[in-house]
Image: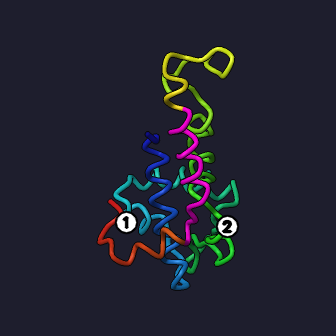
Amino acid sequence: MFSKACEYGIRAMLHIAHKSQIKERVGIKAIAKAIDSPEAFTGKIMQQLSKSGLVQSIKGPNGGFWINDDDRIKINLRQIVEVLDGDQIYVGCGLGLSQCNDNQPCPMHKQYAPVRQALIKIHTKTSLDELATKLDGIATLK
């Protein structure tokens, strides 16, 4: 459903949010290891997320990434997906056709509409903080 970059980005944000809940910053190496992603690829993903303002970072020996308490509550899954993959999953044709819309529907348009709306609702209403809180019982983000 998502690109590999988006999957890694979601997992990275969950890891950072979880660490931020206990007031820890986390570096690229630790993030890459936690989500089983190549370090250079993780760095590029984190650069995009940082530029978008979804995550804060500071360089140096005591640096790393973190997400403020208020931001963890405000950030939802849809925001992360849109930064890394764009909005096509929410507005694009389910068959990938360029001319699909309500006036010129593809053969699956009516079937995809409720699925798309449900996905929008789930991703918009699910906060990063809510997901990070549920990580305590999960052994790994890999």
Q: Nearer the viewer, residue 13 or 137?
A: 137
How far across and down, in percent of the image, does residue 45 sit? 54, 51
Q: Quadrant of the C terminus?
A: bottom left
Q: Which amino acid, mark 1?
A: Ala
Q: Residue furthest bottom?
A: 22
How far across and down, in percent of the image, does residue 28 sit? 48, 64
Query: Which of pointers 1 and 2 indicates the residue nearer the eye?
Result: 2
Which element is circle 1 on?
helix
Magenta span covers which residues? 113-129
The residue labelled by disc 1 is: 34
Alpha-carbon span between mark 1 and mark 2: 24 Å
Count neighbours of disc 2 (C-alpha within 10 A) and say few if under 14, some if 14 to 19, many if 20 or more: some
Q: Which amino acid, mark 2?
A: Lys
Q: Is residue 47 above or below residue 3?
A: below
Residue sitting at x 61%, y 71% = 72
Residue sitting at x 33%, y 76% = 137
The residue labelled by disc 2 is: 74
Residue 14 is covered by the magenta coloring: no
How far across and down, in percent of the image, does residue 17 sit? 53, 71
Q: Is residue 104 left or right of residue 119?
A: right
